[in-house]
Image: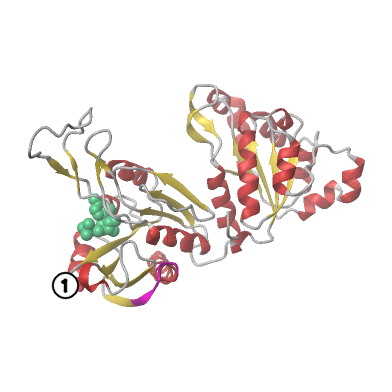
Amino acid sequence: MTENHTALNGRRILLGVSGGIAAYKAAELVRLLRGAGAELRVVMTPAASEFITPLTLQALSGQAVRQSLFDAAHEAAMGHIELARWAELILIAPASADLMARLAAGMADDLLSTLCLASAAPLWLAPAMNQQMWQAAATQANVAVLRERGVQLLGPASGEQACGEQGPGRMWEPAQLLAACVTHFADGPLRGVAVTITAGPTREAIDPVRFISNHSSGKMGFALAEAAAGMGARVRLIAGPVSLSTPTGVARIDVESAEQMLQASLADPGEIFIACAAVADYRAVQVADNKLKKQQPALELKLLRNPDILATMAGQRPRPFCVGFAAETERLAEHAQGKLKAKGLDMIAANWVGERAAGGGFDSEHNALQVFWPGGDRQLALTTKTQLARELMTLVATHYNERKT
Ligand code: C5P
């Protein structure tokens, strides 16, 4: 983490860690939150320290980790009531079934549950447990009680579990939890809005070692993700193979092929869907099981059109606010407006590629855009992709908010 995220700078977050195998992920979460500028205090339940040592979280948070209600030295430094008042947000990750039961019952039998009762700060839980435990009637009843009281649940996600079972109960990834915190504190025109962005190229396999792809760097999509998160959006970034680091507060999903990018997009199109990826138009009809041998003087490769991800998203109901990109070598306005209409978009950002690119384009740090929407357009002058992304996201936010009202 190199850069502080303004939204979390100096924000006081109390991170609770309860006992479960996902407690090891708290180390990464502490690193991310701190890297994003948050002020952190970590409180562990006794069971949590069976899974991860307090020393680890102390070293990463830069603060003494608290575990007991009855620690005289800690109480003298900052009493538990003071700590409860200090917190602007209490995030418990992982939240075990046992902890949730104790919170639902209003117990205060250890430091963490006492702090939850004594604090007026929003309480967020990231549950993590075996899928059977999550689905148990007792847990679900506790969840209902907690939700009714305004406790926010982040997750759990579904998938493979540490115990080898499949199902709901996986803790949200630290990056997702960070994204939720950034969104909570960010103040901007996209506050709380779910934005899904595709970025980078796709790779279409020909055989186990070869693929069809393109030179897209993913820079523009990543810059858009960063700009959207900075405006308070909850950003999912679906990235093809690129060598870029994930912007702070953004949940990233790595994919390779157009089909995988489509499935990841369909899983959560968001309220705003921005297709910035340079999706390969075609894929091999058949992917060879083994490496193709160079025996013939010529090789014929049969290709099949890939699905149009953006057009598919624009056809969803409810339909997200859809933004596309168009790289053109001629008749830019005409082609861009054609795509706007044909794909049923709310906005399209077009740029020159090839001879007319004038310093911008695929692998460059710079670009210029001409943005079209039904009934209007705007020129965004040549500048860095970071700046251009902010300008474009501002335009998107304005139009999205107008449409919503
Ligand atoms: O039709 P064309 O490829 O020029 O459209 C470009 C726009 O459509 C971009 O926003 C791109 O991300 C999106 N696209 C897509 N799926 C495809 C092809 C393009 O989402 N298969």
Residue at the location (11% across, 40% down)?
302
102 or 264: nearer the eye?
264
Check disc 1: other Cα within 10 Å, few if <14, some if 14-19, many if 20+: few
Report helix, strand or loop for mark 1: loop
Q: Is residue 380 visible?
A: yes
Name the residue nearer the viewer: 347 or 390.
Answer: 390
Residue at left offset 54%, top offset 55%: 248
* Residue 381 placement (x, y as % from top left): 35, 78
The answer to whether residue 129 is left or right of residue 239 is: right
Q: Is residue 183 magenta?
A: no
**Outermost left residue:** 297
Q: What color scheme is it? A: secondary structure
Question: How many numbered marks appear?
Answer: 1
x and y percentages locating residue 285 in the rendered image: 16, 37
Residue 33, x across and y down, in percent: 63, 51
At label 1, which amino acid type do we have?
Answer: Arg
40 versus 259 height, above or below: below
Q: Quadrant of the C terminus?
A: bottom left
Residue 17, quarter of picture: top right
- Main secondary structure type of the part rendered in magenta: strand
Q: Residue at x 29, y 55 (%)?
A: 215
Q: Nearer the viewer, residue 101 or 365?
A: 365
Figure quarter occupied by ligand 1:
bottom left
The picture places residue 206, in percent across and down from the top left corner, at 21, 37
Task: Please say if 42 is above or below 379.
Answer: above
In the picture, measured across the screen, residue 49 lies left or right of residue 289, that is: right
Magenta highlight range: 380-386
Q: Can you tell which quarter of the image residue 100 is in?
A: top right
- Residue that numbered label 1 is attached to: 331
Q: Is mark 1 within 8 Å of ligand 1?
A: no
Q: Nearer the viewer, residue 111 or 55?
A: 55
